[in-house]
Amino acid sequence: MAYIRGYSGAVTQVRIPTMSQSVRPGALALTVTPAVSNNMFTIASAAVAPATVTADLYRINRRYTLITSIVAREVTAAPVTIDTTVAVVIKPDNRSQFIGSFTYNDAAGLPVVGSLTGHINYDTGIFSYNIIYSGGTGTSTFSTVSAVLSMRFMPTNTMNGRVRVKIETEMTDVDQ
């Protein structure tokens, strides 16, 4: 059996190995704002409240950090505001830089291309990004509402976020 202790300290018991459940605390889906410095430790602490996720207790896992969706806003000439959620997979490179692009259709059905650039500091947890839009209807303006950053934290000075494994054997008696 594996005993997964989540970020909040709650323990979940699972059988291992399993094809449908990871044997570690789940990734956190954290909403971030464009063009500002987002402190991922502060945002993660709010997501798992009343627990706290701080830089002295956890490290950000580089392997499982990625942007999974972006909410783009279109303001038409009417003026009508339309928010579109675009599913993406944008991972950082080995210099902690996020560089990627995505395409979606605006209200008139024309393609809009968003080009994302961002950076994360894994030590301080500061993440910032911006998106530049091109294409689409000429009378519409495009901007970014938010993005979802999926990430895992590795414990350094806490027991929360760890997995304890206890080997248990099972036997089945067969009557002959």
Image (tube, grey):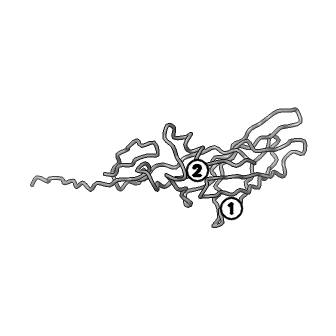
Tag 2 residue: 150
- Residue at image point 82% right, 33% down: 80
**What type is the residue that disc 1 sits on?**
Gln
Q: In this view, does 165 lie above or below 145?
A: below
Q: Nearer the viewer, residue 33 or 74?
A: 33
Give how far apart the Cα atoms at labels 2 and 1 are: 15 Å
Residue 94 lies, in percent from the top left, at 63, 67
Q: Is residue 99 above or below residue 79?
A: below
- Residue at image point 63% right, 46% down: 148
Q: Which of 161 and 80 is in front in this view?
A: 161
Q: Is mark 1 on a helix, strand or loop?
A: strand
Residue 58 lies, in percent from the top left, at 50, 53
Q: Residue 97 carries which label?
A: 1
Q: In the shown orientation, is residue 87 left or right of residue 59?
A: right
Q: How crowded is mark 2: few (under 14 residues within 10 Å), some or many (20 or more)?
A: some
**Mark 2 or mark 1, which is nearer to you?**
1
Q: Residue 127 carries which label?
A: none
- Residue at image point 78% right, 53% down: 113
- Quarter of the image for residue 93 reads bottom right
Q: How crowded is mark 1: few (under 14 residues within 10 Å), some or many (20 or more)?
A: some
Residue 89 lies, in percent from the top left, at 64, 55
Q: Is residue 106 above or below residue 2?
A: above
